[in-house]
Every structure is written in C-alpha cells, then in structure tokens.
Amino acid sequence: MECLKNCSIIIDIEIIENISGANRYFEIVFLAKDKTKSKIIFDCVWDMRYSIENGCIDRFCQFRKCLPEGLIDNSIYIVENSEYIKYFGNQVSGTYPIDEIKDYIMVDAVDAVLEILTIKEPVLERLT
C-alpha cells in the first residue's frame, strides 16, 4: 500500500505559479503561505504528472488510511511503495532501472497536484 513520508523540504505552498523545464530538469516556482516566493528544482526527472486535486481524490483518501507517526503537515512528500513507480517500470520495459527512483508529490492550497519521479533530491531556492 502506498504511504506518504516526510520530505527534507518543509514548505507550505499557497499556489504553484509556474512549471518550466525540459531535458529532465524542471523548476517549480511558487508562492508560500508566508508570501515568500521560492522555487524547487528537480534534476534527473524521469516522469512527471500534473493534475487538479479532484483528479487524486481516491488516492488521497487511501493515503489518509496509512498516515505514519510523525508525518509533518507539508506541501511536498515522498510516496513509498509508489504505484506510479511500478507503472513507470512497466512502461519502460526494463530499459531504465527503477530501484533508485523516488516519487515526490507536491500540492498547493488551490488545487494543483504535481508528481515527479526522479533519482536526485530536489533543491529549494528562495527567490524573495
């Protein structure tokens, strides 16, 4: 069963303002609830999904059934036992090793959900 895990980045995102990038490098610019602007950089992205929150209702309900102790109220998490990683592994038919991939989920307070498969830790940069 999928389960959320704390990420090393602790941030409360009000709204994701921009997603840009290519060639496995992406930057997500956002406004935090404390009104500071920042970006999270994901390098070595293998796959990415963007949806509205309603597109994840059933999945988020399943996450709530498996909340570990000490989970921080946050806007970015790591998904353990990720169904997305399993799906990706099937799609690439063994052409990429999936044992080092991490699945990150980012949400904002409006209705955006961004899910990123990567082999590198994201980096947070303050813009203001």
Image (spheres, rainbow, N blue to C red):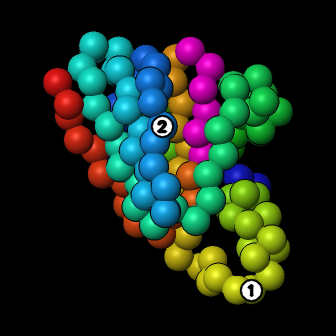
Q: Residue at image x 24%, y 20%?
A: 36
Asked where in the image residue 112 lies, by quadrant, the reply is top right
- Which mark sits nearer the N-terminus, 2 or 1? 2
Residue 27 lies, in percent from the top left, at 39, 44
Looking at the rendered image, the quarter that the N terminus falls into is bottom right
Looking at the rendered image, the quarter that the C terminus falls into is top left
* Magenta residue span: 110-115
Asked where in the image residue 110 lies, by quadrant, the reply is top right
Residue type highlighted by circle 1: Gly
Q: Are marks 2 and 1 in contact (CB under 8 Å)?
A: no
Residue 125 lies, in percent from the top left, at 23, 41
Q: Residue at image x 72%, y 57%?
A: 84
Q: Is residue 100 above or below residue 102?
A: below
Q: Secondary structure at mark 2?
A: strand
Residue type highlighted by circle 2: Ile
Give the main secondary structure, helix, strand or loop, of the magenta stretch: strand
- Within 10 Å of the Cα at label 2, are there few (<14), some (14-19), or many (20+) other Cα atoms? some
Q: Is residue 97 above or below residue 42?
A: below
Which residue lies most toward the front here?
22
Residue 3 lies, in percent from the top left, at 64, 50
Residue 83 lies, in percent from the top left, at 76, 58
Asked where in the image residue 89 lies, by quadrant, the reply is bottom right
**Magenta segment includes 36:** no
Q: Residue at image x 80%, y 82%?
A: 93
Q: Which labelled disc corresponds to residue 19?
A: 2
Q: Nearer the viewer, residue 12 or 90?
A: 90
The residue wearing badge 1 is 94
Can residue 124 be seen by looking at this rendering?
yes
- Within 10 Å of the Cα at label 1, are there few (<14), some (14-19), or many (20+) other Cα atoms? few
